[in-house]
Image: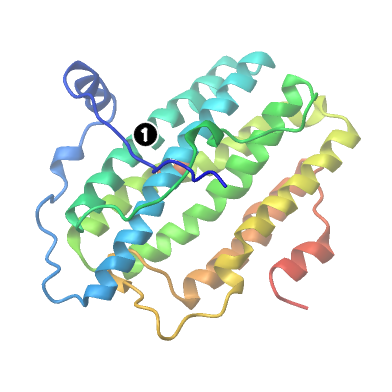
Amino acid sequence: MTVAPLFELSWRGGVTEQRLHRRRPGAEDLPWGSLDLSGAAPDTVVEARRIWTNGVFTEYASAAAFAALGTALLESGAPVDLTAAAADMVVDELFHVELSSRLTTEMGGAVPLRFDLEKISPLTSPGVRALMRAAELAVTTSCVSETLSVPAMARSRAMASAPLVRAVLDRLLADEGPHARLGYWFLEWAADRLTDAERARLAELAVETIEVYAPIWAEPECSSCAAPVGLGGHDERGRDALRTAVTTSIAVPLARHGIVLDAERVTSTLGRT
Ligand SMILES: [Fe+2]
Ligand SMILES: [Fe+2]
């Protein structure tokens, strides 16, 4: 068995850093250096480092997903401003990578995470046309994944007590709303251009993607785990917000574009009968 390489990031600095910070100002205004972990249990700090290491990875994966979506939008002749928005979201996500990495460092550094970056880009169904590639990526990345990240992050923000954690989550959250809407902006343009079979396939993919996230709300809460409430963790109310988002922010708006999810599968994913 081959072991995946460690997930490690690098930073060039200089003119490329200046360019990024001109486009995404404000990083230096955050209260870096203010994190006081002296009262936190060691297990809690390790769990917070694990959560934020995973956060850095998911931000990086989101950048790859929006980059793939941008390419598919270019190849399908999508409206230029819509494509520009997707491309700009790649930069948002890379800025989130920077902020999350710096926060992780202040918590004591990343925990080891193995992933082969050659596999970071999301896959689309083999042989489909560019419009369908764009639709698959828009639905899975924006309409489902980004949409679920909004309530998850909002709950972490509501529970966070450390000013630095709150400031980072505020900055991340400010971008997530448009990230979750991009897929629906795309569907306003594309839905009529898709066939019934393509819309049915998109509904299937949306449910499959929701099922990937289901363990977040389905697994019983671990009473012995060190939930880092003030450092970006989750609780039962956050899980309920995710379940609600599946219906109100995914299933209902997708149906408006003719992408009708299998109600039985969605219900069973939510753990409701
Ligand atoms: Fe993000
Ligand atoms: Fe995002």
**Residue located farthest toward the front when viewing the structure as drawn:** 1
Q: Nearer the viewer, residue 114 or 128?
A: 114
Residue displayed at 61% across by 73% down: 218
- Quarter that holds the C terminus: bottom right
Q: Position of residue 53 (x, y in %)?
A: 35, 53
Residue 246 occupies quadrant: bottom right
Q: Name the amino acid type tagged 1.
A: Leu
Q: Position of residue 187 (x, y in %)?
A: 70, 33
| Residue 154 in sight here | yes
- Decide if residue 252 is in sight here: no
- Which one is nearer the viewer's eye here, 135 or 9? 9
In this rendering, position of residue 264 left or right of residue 94: right
Q: Relative to residue 212, is residue 131 drawn left or right?
A: right
Locate residue 257: give its quadrant: top right
Q: Secondary structure at mark 1?
A: helix
Q: Residue at x 15, y 68 (%)?
A: 37
Rendered image quadrant of residue 17? top left
Point out residue 207 in the picture as x, y percentages from the top left corner.
74, 53
Q: Is residue 141 above or below residue 22?
A: below
Disc 1 residue crowd, few under 14, some 14–19, many 20+, Cα 10 Å: some
**Relative to 212, is 39 above or below?**
below
